[in-house]
Image (cartoon, coloured by chain):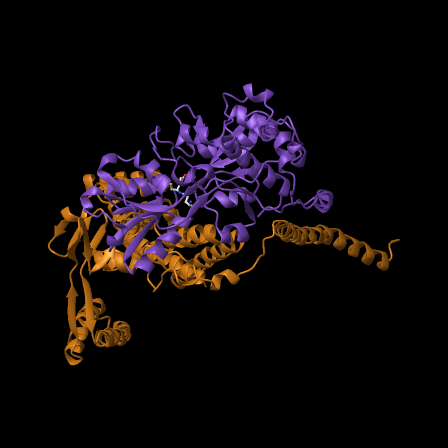
Chain colours: A orange, B purple
């Protein structure tokens, strides 16, 4: 052989270099692109006498917002208007996710129903809500459904507890005194349930006897808070919305008011997303082979037990990953709120605050980071849950 | 996963192109760009009758539209070479700053924070306005002082929503704003009963009342709660362009003062009056100061008309909007319209 070992090493080094070079170039390119955009922005901002900075967040905003979960008015800061928008986004996303999940499970299971009518109705539901563009559905609820409700003085009053008109839905407000005692009761019920569950597992492994943990839980969660509310002298005041008249203008005051913009957004987001979740649920259940159920029955489990112990745990593994995506979509889709004037993050902050200050770069950056963070939090929670219930492979 | 092969040569080429890409700031070139393009990009409203509104065939008209046409006449010699971009109140300044339009003529109020903080220049006032309220007659309210616990429809990104808050704060009255990004949505919401009151500039109230189902059922309250000098806006980094738009408006106002109209301008060519001669481009070098041909002001008056002609054709008492000249009359007739001398 003529090749010295020295030559071989240098060849190998050369090979490594030729592999490394593209990577290196890519990194340089990447850094350069970032540099380019930052520099370009700086130059253009300077040329237009614009200064970049977040100082504006401390100045007062000067505009009021239709409704907010925290104390806010025009003398509050722009930062507070950001919080107002963020909380309104979280509010509609939170309830949207809950309703979409409940509806999605009901419809998804109905899709597999042997009952022809239930089966076909749920099929229509899915195809309808899944295939119409979301914005159109928002407009439908807002401009068609809610706009055709009666005016305030001619409100529909349902059993004195729900008042419906074109300016919103009104429900009574519950005002508790010493509410904290009910909370103690709930907390104790939870602790007790954990103890019972622990005990039940032990009994189950030792004797095979099944203790109905869930029924005990239901009992505790009702009875304990009631007992505690007697101990703590909890009183409940119900504030009903009242119709008042100022000249020829009617208004409901008191109670809890749900504005039409919120309702339209909530309805459309929930229905649209539930159609996708329904399909995930159906797919999840269908993914469990018949053999599993037959095996479960032959082991002596009854129907509910089969569903609870065999089918659902396995189906969830299939259902959760795509459903996570739906939760993320719902949260991001809530930014369509601006189209109907619901004061969410996109509307209040990326809309009103942006146009009042002209701080486009700063505000869009903040809003993008916020949506990114929300998405990452939702997906990490569900990833964690998914891992927890995943099949442990040995 | 398939490995992506990166051709290092391609990467290199990319880097080189990027390095030699010039940083562009695009300042001071609006006039050149307009001439090169052969048309003026003008930002207008999404439809305010009398100010900027497109008819069924897509033809725009209004006093703001006339301003765009006048600028096109001055710079390009042809008032018809305008491309209109309908903009919401919320987007207008961003679109202007980004360079997508050359002039913003969209019932926009001149304020300190906009002029000083947004890197734009306000170059004059083509309509003196003020904010008011519209309400249903059935509400039995005849004064803004009686508005309490009302829901108010308003357009977002406007001075309107700021004045609204100021007013109710000053009066110690309660209200709930319902803010929309488009005027049409705010008007429709008010019409449907979502709000008890609709607020905007009084000119806008008059214009939008024509869009309601039953205009006669609604009333504009007498109070004017703010000053809204509406005028054209340009980017803040182009002095020459700011001057062109500013003096285009001034020519229209001064032409009215000297009685020069679209109809009589050609017959005035033989006049001895130096001021009229200057406005006709027959004396002095007004165009040179703006880097325009000396016929610029003649073209404006000939093709678009003077301020009074534009006013009467679009918002005057004989139009559906029906606004009397009032404070928008020439200073010679007791109004606020006063242009610095075109000389
Ligand atoms: N002058 C105020 C408000 C101007 C404004 O946007 N008014 C509304 C209501 S009349 C409008 O013109 N809307 C037309 C549209 O959205 O296209 C401002 O500059 O902020």
Q: Where A161 sits versus B26, above or below?
A: below
Return the residue nearer the eye: A201 or B303: B303
Number of callouts = 0
- Residue at the image point whose x is 38% and y is 59% from the top: A74
The residue positioned farthest toward the bottom in the image shown: A231
Q: Position of residue A93 (x, y in %)?
A: 35, 55
Of the four image quadrants, the one with ligand 1 is top left
The residue positioned farthest toward the left in the image shown: A159
Quarter of the image where one finds residue A9:
bottom right
Which quadrant is home to the C terminus of chain B? top right
Return the residue nearer the eye: A99 or A355: A355
Quarter of the image where one finds residue A171:
bottom left
Horizontal side, residue B219 vs residue B258: left or right:
left
- Residue at the image point whose x is 37% and y is 39% from the top: B203
Q: Position of residue A131 (x, y in %)?
A: 34, 38
Q: Position of residue A5 (x, y in %)?
A: 84, 59
The residue positioned farthest toward the top in the image shown: B267
Q: Position of residue B8 (x, y in %)?
A: 72, 46
Horizontal side, residue A65 vs residue B191: left or right:
right
Asked whether residue A327 is in view, the answer is no
- Residue at the image point whose x is 20% and y is 39% from the top: A116
Return the residue nearer the eye: A300 or A351: A351
Q: Where A195 sits versus B60, above or below?
A: below
Asked whether residue B341 is in view, the answer is yes
The residue positioned farthest toward the front in the image shown: B272
Return the residue nearer the eye: B253 or B61: B253
Horizontal side, residue A177 vs residue B21: left or right:
left
- Residue at the image point whose x is 31% and y is 40% from the top: B187
Q: Where B165 sits versus B234, above or below?
A: below
């Amino acid at each position: 052989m003529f090749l010295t070992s020295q030559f071989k090493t240098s060849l190998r080094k050369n090979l490594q270099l030729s592999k490394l070079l593209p990577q290196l170039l890519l990194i340089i390119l990447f850094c350069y692109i970032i540099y380019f955009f930052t520099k370009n922005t700086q130059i253009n901002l300077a040329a237009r006498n614009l200064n970049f900075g977040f100082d504006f967040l401390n100045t007062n905003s000067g505009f009021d917002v239709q409704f907010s979960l925290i104390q806010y008015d025009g003398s509050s800061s722009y930062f507070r208007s950001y919080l107002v928008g963020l909380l309104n986004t979280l509010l509609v996303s939170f309830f949207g996710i809950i309703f979409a999940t409940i509806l999605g499970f009901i419809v998804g299971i109905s899709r597999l129903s042997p009952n022809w009518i239930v089966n076909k109705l749920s099929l229509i539901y899915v195809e309808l809500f899944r295939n119409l563009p979301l914005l159109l559905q928002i407009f439908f609820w807002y401009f068609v459904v809610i706009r055709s409700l009666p005016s305030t003085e001619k409100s529909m009053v349902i059993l004195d507890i729900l008042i419906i008109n074109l300016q919103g839905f009104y429900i009574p407000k519950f005002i508790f005194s010493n509410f904290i005692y009910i909370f103690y009761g709930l907390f104790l019920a939870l602790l007790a349930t954990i103890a019972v569950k622990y005990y039940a597992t032990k009994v189950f492994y030792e004797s095979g006897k099944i203790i109905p943990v869930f029924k005990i839980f239901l009992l505790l969660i009702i009875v304990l808070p009631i007992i505690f509310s007697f101990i703590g002298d909890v009183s409940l005041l119900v504030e009903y919305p009242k119709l008042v008249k100022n000249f020829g203008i009617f208004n409901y005051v008191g109670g809890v008011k749900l504005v039409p913009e919120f309702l339209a957004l909530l309805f459309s987001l929930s229905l649209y997303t539930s159609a996708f979740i329904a399909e995930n649920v159906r797919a999840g259940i269908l993914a469990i082979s018949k053999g599993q159920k037959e095996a479960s029955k032959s082991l002596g489990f009854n129907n509910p037990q089969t569903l609870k112990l065999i089918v659902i745990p396995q189906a969830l593994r299939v259902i959760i990953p795509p459903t996570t995506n739906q939760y993320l979509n719902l949260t991001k889709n809530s930014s369509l709120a601006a189209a109907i004037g619901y004061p969410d993050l996109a509307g209040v902050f990326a809309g009103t605050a942006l146009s009042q200050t002209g701080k486009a770069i700063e505000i869009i950056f903040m809003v993008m980071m916020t949506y990114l963070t929300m998405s990452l939090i939702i997906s990490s929670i569900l990833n964690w849950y998914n891992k927890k219930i995943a099949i442990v492979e040995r | 996963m398939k490995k992506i092969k990166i051709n290092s040569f391609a990467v290199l080429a990319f880097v080189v192109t990027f390095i030699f890409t010039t940083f562009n700031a695009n300042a001071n070139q609006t006039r050149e760009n307009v001439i090169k393009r052969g048309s003026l990009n003008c930002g207008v409203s999404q439809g305010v009758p009398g100010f900027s509104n497109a008819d069924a065939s897509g033809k725009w008209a209004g006093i703001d539209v006339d301003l765009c046409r006048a600028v096109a006449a001055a710079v390009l010699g042809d008032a018809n070479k305008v491309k209109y971009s309908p903009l919401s109140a919320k987007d207008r300044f961003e679109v202007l700053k980004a360079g997508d339009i050359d002039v913003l003529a969209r019932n926009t109020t001149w304020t300190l924070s906009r002029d000083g903080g947004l890197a734009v220049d306000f170059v004059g006032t083509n309509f003196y306005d003020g904010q008011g309220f519209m309400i249903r007659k059935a509400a039995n309210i005849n004064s803004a002082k009686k508005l309490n616990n009302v829901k108010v429809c308003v357009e977002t990104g406007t001075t309107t929503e700021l004045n609204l808050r100021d007013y109710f704060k000053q009066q110690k009255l309660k209200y709930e704003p319902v803010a929309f990004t488009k005027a049409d949505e705010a008007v429709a919401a008010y019409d449907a009963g979502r709000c008890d009151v609709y607020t905007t500039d009084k000119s806008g109230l008059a214009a939008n009342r024509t869009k309601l189902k039953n205009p006669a059922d609604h009333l504009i309250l007498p109070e004017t709660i703010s000053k809204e000098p509406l005028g054209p806006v340009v980017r803040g980094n182009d002095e020459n362009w700011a001057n062109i738009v500013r003096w285009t408006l001034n020519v229209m106002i001064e032409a009215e003062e000297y009685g020069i109209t679209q109809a009589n301008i050609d017959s005035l060519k033989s006049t001895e009056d130096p001021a009229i001669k200057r406005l006709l481009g027959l004396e002095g070098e007004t165009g040179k100061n703006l880097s325009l041909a000396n016929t610029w002001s003649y073209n404006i008056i000939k093709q678009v008309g003077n301020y009074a002609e534009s006013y009467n054709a679009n918002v005057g008492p004989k139009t559906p909007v029906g606004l009397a000249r009032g404070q928008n009359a020439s200073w010679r007739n007791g109004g606020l319209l006063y242009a610095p001398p075109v000389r």
